[in-house]
Image (tube, rainbow, N blue to C red):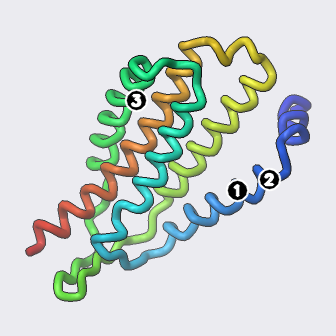
Amino acid sequence: MGTIVAAIAHTPFWVFPVIAFVLGMGARHLRARTLSPRTLFVMPLIIAAASIANAATTDLDAAHAFAAWIPSAALGLVIGWTLAPRPLGIDRQEGQIFIAGSAQPLLIIVALVMLRYTFGYLYGRWPELHGNPTYAAELVAGGALLAGVTAGRYGRFGWWYRRSA
């Protein structure tokens, strides 16, 4: 328990409002909502950007980062596609997709925050791990998996929208 308290105590203050903001963004997905096809890919792009930013902060060279990112993202894409619930409704004339509330986007955001926070702690506590390619590949692969799940989920919503014509 002391380690957790120490980790939180040594976290820069600005991190907490960022965490609160992203958790708030995830909590919005708990309620049913209406999306336009143009906005379907906003969250997947944000998660992918965060994942790529995580990859860029590691000591992995581009080839190894790419080798860790692509298969993990592909697996996540399949998982997200499979787990995506059918939309509550689709209105092609208004250009709207009605989606049920879900904890999945919030859980993905929580997992991404935990992944980054954990590796930040590990790298801060044991700086020698920063040069370890295994830890770097795990960070890259974890972020890519989450990005893939998000892209698969929202990609399937878009697929259902296009099929509804």
Three-letter code for the amino acid on which mark 2 is drawn: Trp
The residue sitting at 86% across, 29% down in the picture is: 3
Q: Label 2's element?
A: loop
Three-letter code for the amino acid on which mark 1 is drawn: Val
Q: Label 1's element?
A: helix
Three-letter code for the amino acid on which mark 3 is drawn: Trp
Instruction: Identify the mark nearer the N-term, 3 or 1.
Output: 1
The residue sitting at 76% across, 50% down in the picture is: 15
> Are the residues tagged 2 and 1 within 8 Å (C-beta)?
yes
User: Could you give the CA–CA distance between mark 3 and mark 1, rounded to whole angstroms?
Assistant: 25 Å
Q: Position of residue 64 (x, y in %)?
A: 42, 18
Residue closest to the far bottom: 94
Q: Position of residue 43 (x, y in %)?
A: 44, 59
Q: Label 3's element?
A: helix
Q: Quadrant of residue 163?
A: bottom left
User: Could you give the CA–CA distance between mark 2 and mark 1, rounded to whole angstroms?
Assistant: 7 Å
Q: Residues within 10 Å of mark 1 (few under 14, many from 20)?
A: few
- Residue identifier under label 3: 69
Q: Residues within 10 Å of mark 3 (few under 14, many from 20)?
A: many
Q: Quadrant of residue 76?
A: top left
The residue sitting at 84% across, 35% down in the picture is: 7
- Residue identifier under label 2: 14
Above or below, comparing residue 123 to residue 113 in the picture: above
Looking at the rendered image, the quarter that the C terminus falls into is: bottom left
Instruction: Identify the mark nearer the N-term, 3 or 2.
Output: 2
- Residue identifier under label 1: 18
Q: Position of residue 54 (x, y in %)?
A: 56, 35
The residue sitting at 63% across, 65% down in the picture is: 24
User: Could you give the CA–CA distance between mark 3 and mark 2, rounded to whole angstroms?
Assistant: 28 Å
